[in-house]
Image (spheres, helix red, strand yellow):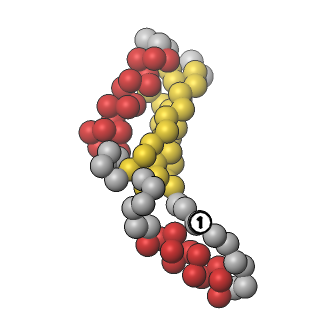
Amino acid sequence: MKYQAEVRISLKKGMLNPEASTIQRALALLNYHVEDTKTAETVTFSLEAKSPEDAREEVDQMCQRLLCNPIIHDYHITVIPGDE
């Protein structure tokens, strides 16, 4: 069966995030004052698997081997049935 997967990748709490800091400073220059700015990356794709659990396990392996650095990143996986 085909599944749609979405992986949301963000830096772990306490990691320096220069991109978020730059965004926060730029917004302040435009008179928008925000706190606790965070950035995240989203990766989406479709894959074949026997079950949603198998799809999630395969995506988790992808995250650990390529998509994320588990030392500095947190990630959240969403798997839904796709179109046949």
Residue 1 in the figure: left or right of residue 28: left
Is residue 49 visible to the viewer in this orientation of the structure? Answer: no
Residue 71 in the figure: left or right of residue 53: left
Residue 80 in the figure: left or right of residue 13: right
Could you tell me residue 81's position as x and y percent?
Answer: 58, 21
Q: Quadrant of residue 49?
A: top left
**Residue ranking furthest to the top:** 50
Residue at point 67%, 72% (across, down): 34
Secondary structure at numbered mark 1: loop
Q: Is residue 36 above or below residue 52?
A: below
Residue at point 43%, 22% (across, down): 55
- What amino acid is labelled 1 in the image? Asp
**Residue that numbered label 1 is attached to:** 36
Q: Depth check: 23 or 59 in front?
A: 23
Could you tell me residue 26's position as x and y percent?
Answer: 60, 82
Q: Quadrant of the C terminus?
A: top right
Residue at point 38%, 50% (across, down): 73
Could you tell me residue 38's position as x and y percent?
Answer: 55, 62
Could you tell me residue 7's position as x and y percent?
Answer: 48, 40
**Residue ranking furthest to the bottom:** 29
Residue at point 52%, 60% (across, down): 39
Q: Depth check: 61 or 33 in front?
A: 33
